Image: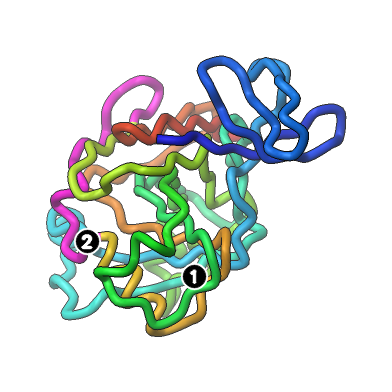
Amino acid sequence: MTVIGRFMDNGMIFEGEVVGDKVISRADFREYGLNELKILPPCSPSKVVCVGLNYRDHAEEMKDRIPDEPVLFLKPPSSVIGHGDNIIYPAQSKRIDYEAELAVVIGKKTGHIRADKADDHILGYTCLNDVTARDLQKKDVQWTRAKSFDTFSPIGPFIVTGVDPSSLSIKSRLNGEVKQSSNTKNLIVDVRRLVEFVSGVMTLEAGDVIATGTPSGIGPMEKGDVIEIEIEKVGTLMNLVA
C-alpha cells in the first residue's frame, strides 16, 4: 500500500508520499515532518459523483425502496475541504447530517469501463463525509442544494492505494461516540460495478471521486461538534462543525 496526500508548505502546494510521520515530496524527494504541513484534500476532483441508498440498511432507514440501479447525484468541487478543515453550518438550514462513505479516486481519464477492468482506472481510496442539509433535502424535489453547500464534501486525509475495497469496516464518530458502524461488504452495488455504471454515464477525469454510499445511523451535527469518518486500512477523516 502507498499513502498519497496533498500538502501546503509556506504557500507551496505539492503531492507527497506519507511514510509514518514523514512526507516525501513526489517532485523533488524533499522530506518534511507531517506535523509541519497543512493537509489539503488529497485530490482536486472536477466532480464528486455520489451514490444514494447503496447500503440496504440505509435505504430502510430512509424508508425508501432498494433502487433497481444506482441513484447518482453530483457535488460541486467548491464543496470539497480537507482533513482538519471546518464544516460551515449554512444559514439556510436548520439540520445538517453526517454520512460516512468510502470514496474511490480515479487515476486516469476513464469512460465505459467494465467492472473487471475497474482496478486499472482506480488510483486509490479515501474517506468522505457526504454532509447533507437534511431539512432542505426533504423540502426540495431534488438534492442539489442540500448536498452542495461550500464545505459539504470533506475528503481525506490521504489516498491509499492497493486496498481491496470489498470488506472494509466503516464508522462515523460524533464527539467520540460511534454513530455508524458497517462494512463495505454490505454495499448493494460494489465498488467495481459502480465504476462501470458511472463511467457508462459520464467521462471520469483523473482525480474525480465516486462516493459509494453511506450505511445506517446518519444523524445531525451541531456547531462545535467534531465528526470523524474512519475506514479500515484507509484512515480517519476529522472535521469540526463551525
Residue type at mark 1: give it. Answer: Leu
User: Is residue 6 within the magenta segment?
Assistant: no
Residue found 38% across the figure and 35% down from its top = 234
Q: Residues within 10 Å of mark 2 (few under 14, many from 20)?
A: some
Local SS, label 1: strand
Q: Residues within 10 Å of mark 1 (few under 14, many from 20)?
A: some
Residue found 60% across the figure and 60% down from its top = 45
x%, y% of residue 207? Answer: 57, 59
**Does the rendering let one see residue 103?**
yes
In which image quadrant can residue 141 be found? bottom left
Q: Which residue is mark 2?
A: 190
Residue found 84% across the figure and 36% down from its top = 12
Mark 2 touches mark 1? (CB < 8 Å):
no
Residue found 57% across the figure and 34% down from its top = 83
Placement of the N terminus among the 4 image quadrants: top left
x%, y% of residue 77? Answer: 63, 61
x%, y% of residue 175? Answer: 40, 22
Local SS, label 2: loop
Task: Give the magenta range.
Answer: 173-190
Q: Residue furthest front?
A: 29
Q: Is residue 57 left or right of residue 87?
A: left
In this view, the residue in front, 23 or 238, is 23
Q: Is residue 72 shown above or below 21?
A: below
Residue type at mark 2: give it. Answer: Asp
In this view, the residue in front, 12 or 117, is 117
Q: Which residue is mark 1?
A: 74
In which image quadrant can residue 21 be found? top right
